């Protein structure tokens, strides 16, 4: 994936697949939740924010659990990033609950910008780690031949 990926729109595509099925389906749902928020009209924003929060809490809790269960190395920075993103979402939601929806569109765009990098850098490392563990340390991923640096 292009590391400089920036878009006004985030759509699900095979490029976002990381190869661990349970994570990929949650990620597809994340993309849908953010797209639904971006496309919401004023009267739908409160409900779309609620759906986003339900999704994100489940999504992040599940990945955090996988990291803890599998002793994923360097899990702290991934867990911290989840917490920071959830905090931003909750701040916007607190405004929406008060009737101020002015930050919703900015939030949906920020999440669209954030997600591909997070998935590519942090989630993909976790997906590979889980697949490797489940296969008893024998990854069957077909890799390009990369010379070993010694
Ligand atoms: Fe994720
Ligand atoms: Fe993550």
Image (cartoon, rainbow, N blue to C red):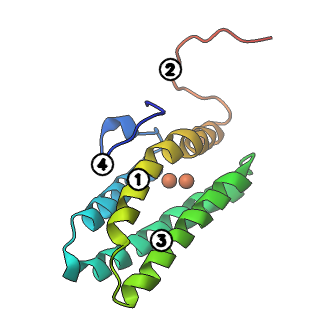
Please give the name of the residue rendered at 31% of the width and 48% of the height, measured from the top-left corner.
10
| Mark nearer the N terminus (3 vs 1) | 1
Please give the name of the residue rendered at 59% of the width and 45% of the height, measured from the top-left corner.
122
| Mark nearer the N terminus (4 vs 1) | 4
| Mark nearer the N terminus (3 vs 2) | 3
Please give the name of the residue rendered at 57% of the width and 58% of the height, measured from the top-left corner.
63
Disc 1 beta carbon < 8 A from ligand 1? yes
Q: Quadrant of the N terminus?
A: top left
Disc 3 beta carbon < 8 A from ligand 2? no
Residue where numbered disc 1 is placed: 27
Residue count near mark 4 (Cα–Cα under 10 Å), binned few <14, some 14–19, many ≥20: few
**SS assignment at label 1:** helix
Circles 3 and 2 in contact, beta carbons < 8 Å: no
| Mark nearer the N terminus (1 vs 2) | 1
Left or right: where does residue 137 sit relative to residue 131? right
Circles 4 and 2 in contact, beta carbons < 8 Å: no
Residue where numbered disc 2 is placed: 142
Labels 3, 2: front one = 3
- Alpha-carbon span between mark 1 and mark 2: 23 Å
Please give the name of the residue rendered at 37% of the width and 63% of the height, measured from the top-left corner.
106
Residue count near mark 2 (Cα–Cα under 10 Å), binned few <14, some 14–19, many ≥20: few
Residue where numbered disc 4 is placed: 8
Circles 4 and 1 in contact, beta carbons < 8 Å: no
Labels 3, 1: front one = 3
On the image, the x and y values in percent for residue 91 come to: 50, 77
The correct choice, above or below, for 103 with respect to 147 in the image is below
On the image, the x and y values in percent for residue 68 come to: 70, 58
- Alpha-carbon span between mark 3 and mark 2: 37 Å
Residue where numbered disc 3 is placed: 89
């Amino acid at each position: 994936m292009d590391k400089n990926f920036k878009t006004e729109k985030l759509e699900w595509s095979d490029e976002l697949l990381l190869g661990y099925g349970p994570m990929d389906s949650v990620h597809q749902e994340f993309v849908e939740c953010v797209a639904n928020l971006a496309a919401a009209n004023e009267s739908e924003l409160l409900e779309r924010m609620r759906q986003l929060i339900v999704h994100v809490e489940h999504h992040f809790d599940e990945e955090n659990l996988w990291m803890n269960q599998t002793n994923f190395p360097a899990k702290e920075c991934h867990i911290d990033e989840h917490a920071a993103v959830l905090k931003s979402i909750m701040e916007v939601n607190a405004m929406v609950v008060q009737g101020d929806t002015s930050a919703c569109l900015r939030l949906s765009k920020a999440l669209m910008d954030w997600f591909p990098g997070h998935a590519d850098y942090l989630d993909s490392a976790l997906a590979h780690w889980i697949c490797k563990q489940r296969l008893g340390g024998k990854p069957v991923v077909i890799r390009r031949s990369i010379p070993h640096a010694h």
